[in-house]
Image (cartoon, rainbow, N blue to C red):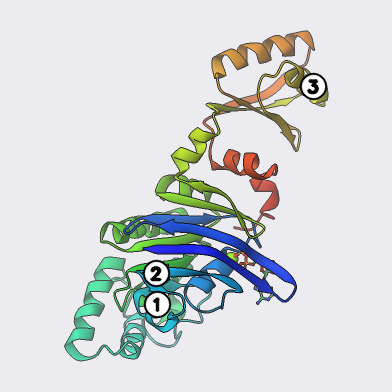
Amino acid sequence: MIEVLSLSKNFGEKTVLRDITFSVAPSTMTFLLGPNGAGKTTLIRLLCGLLEPTSGSFKIAGIDSSRIADIKRVVGVVLPGERNLYWKLTGEENLEFFGSLYGLWGRKLAVRIAEIVELTGIEEFYRTPVERYSTGMRQRLSLARALLHEPKVLLMDEPTSGMDPIAKNQMEKLLSKLARNGVTLLVSTHDMPQVERLADQVLIIDAGRIVAQGSPAQLIAEMGQKALIRFVLDGPPDEVVDVISRQQLGPVDVLEGEVRLWSSSPDETIGDLFAILRQTSTRLLRIEVTKPGLDGVFWRATGRYWEFDRGGQE
Ligand SMILES: Nc1ncnc2c1ncn2[C@@H]1O[C@H](COP(=O)(O)OP(=O)(O)OP(=O)(O)O)[C@@H](O)[C@H]1O
Ligand SMILES: [Mg+2]
């Protein structure tokens, strides 16, 4: 449904996206994940025709990027910020106005609005002025607006940013429902657990390049690690980390005093680790064993930590 071939984008001297190639199967959800400035928004803006590629091309629903006006007819876009809604108007009036821009009117428009109101679950508030909406309500109305012309493909930039867990959960359910109804979704997010929950495919983007691509389960399995052991000692961990490295227990690193040790056979590794701690007479303050996730994939792909690079922005 989406095919992107060697797409690159420069702003002046600066290359922001390089050689991006991927495809998205119909009726599936693909997530773009990457630190601030990775190029996610730029990619979305390219695919909906708000920016022109420096080189490369793409096809959406079989339509080549040289025919961007035709692409716009089959693509819905939700970008952050509320400039795409009129604040003084109600949700319903907004939908009527934007529907008329798509050439919908009369009964056809009324029927479409009723469908979308139900689909997006905005019944409770769509007759109040947008200026009274919360972030989550505005995001859902923006989505409703993007669905007016029944797009086959939906491009969304951080649709759950700033939402509380309840609103986020509602939005996630809505995205799943859209995919089940045949819409193909490409969504950017900073929310790694969300990607692990929903994605058929994830593209991890770092500094304008795709550094990992596949289903979350596939990427995590490819790492070949069954557990992530995180622990904190009562003193500097350098000596223990040295011994772990020498004995080759598994890939190991230290982040802000916390040791992270990856293991392909956790039972054995934990046994070895406790033996090392006894030898070095170091005391354990905290230890946690978790399943490896996409943050591990990011670390293995870039040598850097996801939490560290994000700059703390949600
Ligand atoms: N119009 C522009 N002119 C020059 N540079 C730009 C422009 N738009 C984006 N950039 C640069 O392109 C890079 C990628 O930006 P982009 O907004 O695509 O990142 P992002 O992955 O969406 O980040 P975030 O997670 O913060 O939303 C950044 O370095 C940004 O400064
Ligand atoms: Mg962005």
The answer to which image quadrant residue 2 occupies is: bottom left
Q: Secondary structure at mark 2?
A: strand
Point 33% across, 55% down: residue: 176
Which one is nearer the viewer's eye here, 206 or 137? Answer: 206
Point 37% across, 85% down: residue: 94
The amino acid marked with disc number 2 is: Ile
- Residue 99 seen: yes
Point 32% across, 77% down: residue: 126
Marks 2 and 1 sit apart, C-alpha to C-alpha, by 7 Å
Q: Residues within 10 Å of mark 2 (few under 14, many from 20)?
A: many
Q: Residue beneath label 3, please?
A: 242
Position of 110 relative to 141 (above/below): below
Which one is nearer the viewer's eye here, 221 or 100? Answer: 221
The amino acid marked with disc number 1 is: Ile
The answer to which image quadrant residue 283 occupies is: top right
Q: Secondary structure at mark 3?
A: helix
